Image: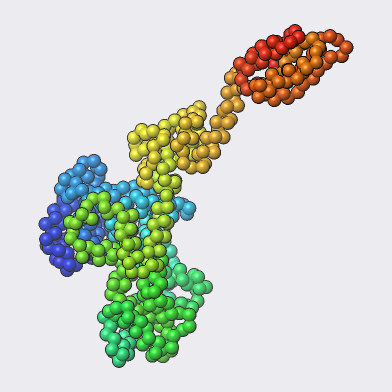
Amino acid sequence: MEWEEYQKKLTEYGIDKKDFDDIEKAFIFASDAHEGQVRFSGDAYITHPINVSLKIALLKLDTRTIIAALLHDTVEDEKTTLRIIRKKFGEEVAFLVNGLTKVKKIKYRGVERQIESMRKMFLAWAEDVRVVIIKLMDRLHNMETLDSHPKQEKRERIALETLEIYAPLADRLGMWSVKSQLEDLSFKYVYPEEYKWLIDEVHTKIPDREKYLELLRPIVARELDKEGISSIEISWRAKNYYSLWKKLLKKDMDWSRILDLTAVRIIVKDVEACYATLGVIHKVWRPLPGRIKDYIALPKPNGYQSLHTTVFCEDGRVTEFQIRTPHMNRDAEFGIAAHWAWEMAGKPKDGARFQHGKFAWVKQLQEWQKEFKKTKQSGAEFLETLKIDFFKNRIFVLTPKGDVIDLPEGATPVDFAYTVHSEIGECTSGAKINGKMSALSHSLKSGDVVEILTQKNKKPSEEWLKFVKTSIARSRIKGSLRKSSHSLYSLGVKKPQKVDIIITAGNRVGLLKDVISVFESFRLNIEKITSDSSGIDYPIINISFTPKNDGQVEKIKTRLKNLVRVEEVTIKEKSR
Ligand code: MN
């Protein structure tokens, strides 16, 4: 595609002409960078970033995001290319492109317990939701052109990754249209037989649904007209294949139990008109009990708003209606991206809010939240859960192989090592974070790649207890210190041992009491005391105790010697 044609598209999508110079600069830069590169389809590589950027433009995101989309695959050498991009296109574009380069490194491992962590990490790592949106559009275009990938195994892996990581992400962001496109495009590769079966079923089971709905359209318009409601749009939409298939699985493959196979969508100007329209539908056709849903008063967890009802329609055919305003419709299709566009529309593009760093994902969520709070409580609640869900004091770091390790905020390389494997923790001698040697007490950040250096006979240090954050690391370090303290004593370091003292003294009243008070003054427990004075002048007192330290024994000996009539004090050391 040449610039002229591209420019025409931008105009069509309503992009401001004054930004065309900047966009053209990126268009040329990307074309040069991909010069000579060819896709599997045989197309020039540049067709890919062009397509991705047009998808972004269609979503009405800001110019910098369009530029970042054009540049998203140009970074080969992070240091040099990013520096050039920063110089040519500014800090914010460089920030977005860097984010995209980072998320490229996330390797899909397909391990079930890791999938949720990966999604979270993806979001945390992307830092800015626009990075996620570009990445979703990048994936969408790659899925659209997946047919030309020569390796079947690779096609399946990419499709599965799309189904498990990217489609749920789009769903979380409320981007329904992107989610269903990604799902249907993957469905074909991941479950080819089921896909084929479903398509055939849809075509044979309900061949006339299109005809029926076309017939219904003027009837609905006429009924609304009678009540003075003018509809902006009456359309219909088939449930996407993948979610239809999932629903069939749930309903024992019984088609008759799927009532929202196709829905008639009525778009009217405001909320009042929505409720009025619902009234009209119910007046004309009898509603099915339990199928009326007011997602305007109570939006779905992802923010979705609409009124739904299912009625016995013309010829008694069960038909679902969805009633909403244009704003709700756009939000439902494009989710967070639509929100972005609304926000942009009313504000100067170079306002302070749009400077580098202020776009951070969390920040945007907070903005979003504020706006929802103004209007409806449940929206705010949704965002609160979204935020907590994604960022509840967790960070996500990577092993050099690309496995995701989920850790609490402030976790250190030592926590990482013990979480990966306790044996690695035990032998940790150093750590590299993103390729650089770092202190073991360093606080890790989401997205860090951590490599633990080990040494065979290395032992955990007591120091580590001062900074570790995970209980697993803490308990393992303590356990290991305990073990090694035992072995230290066995290596000759003295540990308090039980001592026997033998006192020979002239017999006198109160001697035993004086001996005991010596031990009491040192706050020592006498463990055993025997006194043998069988008919001799010089009784023998045998006392067992455990001194608190080595010096104590000598002090006690001296004190005992000084007692009246004590003749001799000897020490007999025993091992336990
Ligand atoms: Mn790409």
In the figure, residue 542 lies in which quadrant?
top right
Above/below status of 37 relative to 466 = below
Above/below status of 318 relative to 503 = below
Q: Residue furthest top?
A: 567
Q: Residue at x 35, y 65 (%)?
A: 373
Q: Residue 425, image x and y in percent?
A: 49, 36
Q: Residue 217, image x and y in percent?
A: 31, 85
Q: Residue furthest front?
A: 509
Q: Is residue 294 visible?
A: yes
Q: Residue furthest bottom?
A: 226
Q: Is residue 27 visible?
A: no
Q: Residue at x 40, y 47 (%)?
A: 395
Q: Residue 404, image x and y in percent?
A: 42, 47
In the figure, residue 536 lies in which quadrant?
top right
In the figure, residue 386 lies in which quadrant?
bottom left
Q: Is residue 201 left or right of residue 138?
A: right
Quadrant (top left, top right, bottom left, bottom right) of the C terminus: top right
Quadrant (top left, top right, bottom left, bottom right) of the N terminus: bottom left
Q: Residue at x 36, y 46 (%)?
A: 447
Q: Residue 303, image x and y in percent?
A: 37, 67
Q: Residue at x 49, y 70 (%)?
A: 249
Q: Is residue 22 left or right of residue 367?
A: left
Front residue of this view, candidates 215 and 468:
468
